[in-house]
Every structure is written in C-alpha cells, then in structure tokens.
Image (spheres, rainbow, N blue to C red):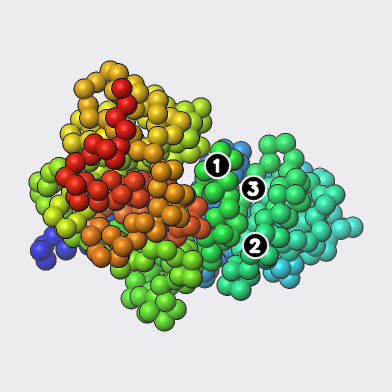
Amino acid sequence: MAATSDTSNCSRRLADVIWQREIEFALRQVGTGTEPLGLLAFTQRTYPTYEIARHHQALAEKLESVERGEILRLLVTCPPRHGKSELASVRFPAWFLGRHPNKRVILVSYGAELAYTFSRRARELFGQPEWPFGAKLAGDLTSVSRWDTTEGGGLVAAGVGGPITGQGANCLLIDDPCKNWEEAASVAVSQSAWEWFQSTARTRLQPGAAIVVCMTRWHPDDLVGRLLRAEADGGERWEHLRLPALAEADDPLGRTPGEALWPTWYSAEALAETRLAIGEQYFGGLYQQTPVLDTARLLKPEYFRSERPPETPVRPIYQFWDTAFTDKTSADWSVCGTWSLEKNSFRLLDVWRGRVTYPDLKAEAARLYQQWKPAAMVIEAKASGLVLAQEFQRDTRWPVLVFHPDRWGDKVARVHACTPVMAAGRVVLPESAPWKAEYLAELLGFPRAAHDDQVDMTTMALISLSLTAQEQGWIGEFEVMA
C-alpha cells in the first residue's frame, strides 16, 4: 500500500513540475514576438508577485476564449480568497481593452464601491511602464465609474441595480453580485437582482457580446443558480467552470478527490478546519460551490448510506428513466438510475445523466439495458419517455414499463412519500462514484437546487421498489403498454 501511495505522490509531483515548466515557458514569451501576449503573461508582467496556480491557468484559458469570441456565456464559481477577482475583474478587463481598445466593458459587483475599486485598478494599468499595448486612456473621461480609451472603447463600473442604461457592452463582467448570506437568503433581494440582470444588464449587450459571471456561491437561488435553472428550462447555454476548494470526482483540473485547490495557500488540512468552524451548509456553498439550504432541505445527508458495492451486483436489477421533456432540444437533462433490490435496502449502482437528442437518448438506453440486463426498464410517462417506451415495446422483447408520476402527487409530495424509506437508511450508495457528488448535491438541495431530474428518478425508483418489495410483483402498479 505504501508503494502505491509513493507512486501516486511521485506522479503528482511530476505532473506539477511539468505544469510549472509550461507556465514558465509561456511567461518567457513576453516580448519575444513568438506568441500574442496571453492573459497570464500580462498578469505576470504587470503584477510580478502574483502566484499562478493551476486554477488560475484554467480561469485564464476560459477568459481568453471569451476574448477570442469562442465562449459568449461563461460562469465561474470559485471559493473566496483564491485570486479570481484579481484575474477576472482587474487584469482581464485591462488586457481585453488593451487588445481591443475600441470595445466596451461593463463591470458590475454587489456594490458600486467594489466595482469602482476594480475599475480604478484596471485603469491604473494603462499608465504602468510595463503596459504592453498601444491603447491609451482618453484624457477627458477617466473617472472610476467610467473611463474611455482614445479609440472609443472603455469601461463602465456599477453596483448591482446601479445605473448602466444608455451604455453598451461587448463584455458584461459580473463579479460577486451577492454580498453576504443575508442578501443571498432574501427572496426580495434575489428577485430584485434577477430582474435587474434580465431587464437592465442583459439588455446592454452589443451583437456578439459576452457575459462573464464570476462568483462564490452562497445560495441555490443566487444568480448562478437561476441561470443554470433557466438553461435547464431551454434558456441560454453556459460554459461553467466550477472550482471546488476540495476536489471531487471528475475534477476539471484533474485533481484527486480531496486535493486542495490552492494548497500553497489553503491546504486540505486548513480547509478541513474551516469546514468544521463554519459548518457544512456554508462550506458546501462558499467552498465547494454546491449550496444547499438546511431550512428548506427535505432530505438530509444522513439518509444515505455509503458502502463498497459487491463485486457481483445482487439481482434483481431495475432501471428507471426520467427523460428530457422534448426530443427537439438538448438543453434538458435525461437521467437513468440502475438499482438493485436487496433485503431491507435499495442499492443505487449507477447513474447516467446527459443532454442528448432523442436518437442519442434511445441509443444510450439500449446500451445501458444491454450492459445491466435489468428485470425491468421503467420509463416515466411523459413526452419523449412515452415515445421511447412505445418504440422499445414495439421493436424489442425487453420488459419495458411506464411510470405515471402524477398518480403519486407533485414532486414535493413524491419526495415526502419516499422520505421514511430514506430516513430508515434503506438507500445505499457506493463509497466512490464519479456521479455521486452531483447526485447528492441535487437531492440535498431539493426543492431549490438548479435541477431535479435525479430527484424524479430517485422517487420513481423508491416508490416502485418499495411496492415491489412489499408485494413481490409489478403488475397492478405499472401500466404495461400494449
């Protein structure tokens, strides 16, 4: 075991060395003419002591994609004091306007004073000896609330709800639109900020303009939460760079689970102390970027047991499908949960979740059926699910059943119906799985989480499996379509 650990540590150190060499090479290109001046090189040139870590590199790559017009809608969620504002709200707008002095930036934060501070520091970079661009400030308009370049571009700074009407933007940059928990928890404040974003900020965009939202999460109903829910309902698609303080499965930086985001500043041990000091609710939002509400929480973490799954799953196995509302869009999520029915427990073996068109959904359902050979494939009776069930029943001999959720009440009623089963510890999850963190975040955040497709799948499974366990049969509880 020690040898394996040593090998893992050596591999990680080697990866860090290689990454650092790549950063050093990129920074050496400053002034050589071999490459355009990138955001990190610009930051190092104008702020030599700025410590660049892997998450800064990931953030810079996304912002450079915004500058190139490759990403038009970007969400960045990151823990406090991890350098996001320095890079995104000070260096980036100056670098962006240095490269495009005829374009305009609107910079917004929770209060005007903070936005003015970012604006002032970005403006001051134009006068540094290290300033690498030909862009210059216009002498007649250089206040912190608005400053222009000599080529007609410039920056406007304001607080959320502040005056930006009459201004246009090629890049709308919103950094931490929420000040604290009191604001985040206020329905009135959240709704006011959302209406301001929709009616004022969003309408300032020039054709082809970008929106960048950088924030630390406080609440499921914050701006990022609302944007993600709007996306799930068929709204604008967003690129989301989520950077939890402690790595989870499928980390965007390739970290191992539990590894700290910026270990030279905040080690895993220090973060564990912070977690203990502030509690799981605040740590989950502020540091892990998955906010949930204890006061609104219907489901609790202790409801879910974690065990190492058996090498051979106990049969019977069942699959439950909650499909996207329509096959005409890939904005909604479809989800499949594979469960085994064991004595006194319901074990979740696997979760597949994706945004796919109907042909890909059908192919994925067929693949998962062949992989697990379930005793029944249960599909929720709505739009694309009905079509999926009908086609499989027509074209295969698979045991395809449909589930009518409305017979069991609305979403909240179904969760309440399943709560006793979960509270009794009958739901078993694997100790480790790439889907586990998102699955738990959604269930623990219900009903105010951004999505509820995995919640629907879970209640469908638990209602069905509970009846199966009680009656040892499906007929009479599900309608088998002819």
**Three-letter code, disc 3:** Ile
**Three-letter code, disc 1:** Asp
Mark with earlier residue (3, 2): 2
To which residue does mark 3 refer?
A: 211
On residue 190, which mark appears? 2
On residue 233, which mark appears? 1
**Relative depth, front residue between 362 and 419:** 419
**Relative depth, front residue between 171 and 441:** 441
In the rendered image, the residue lying farthest to the right is 140
From the top left corner, tell me how far across and down residue 201 is, in percent. Answer: 73, 51
Q: Callout 2: helix, strand or loop?
A: helix
**Relative depth, front residue between 473 and 456:** 473
- Asked if residue 466 shows in the view, the reply is yes
From the top left corner, tell me how far across and down residue 70 is, in percent. Answer: 57, 38
Mark with earlier residue (2, 1): 2
From the top left corner, tell me how far across and down residue 179 is, in percent. Answer: 63, 70
**Three-letter code, disc 2:** Ser
Residue in the picture at 67% in, 59% down? 191
Locate residue 323 relative to residue 122 in the image: left or right. Answer: left
Residue in the picture at 47% in, 63% down? 291
Q: Callout 1: helix, strand or loop?
A: loop
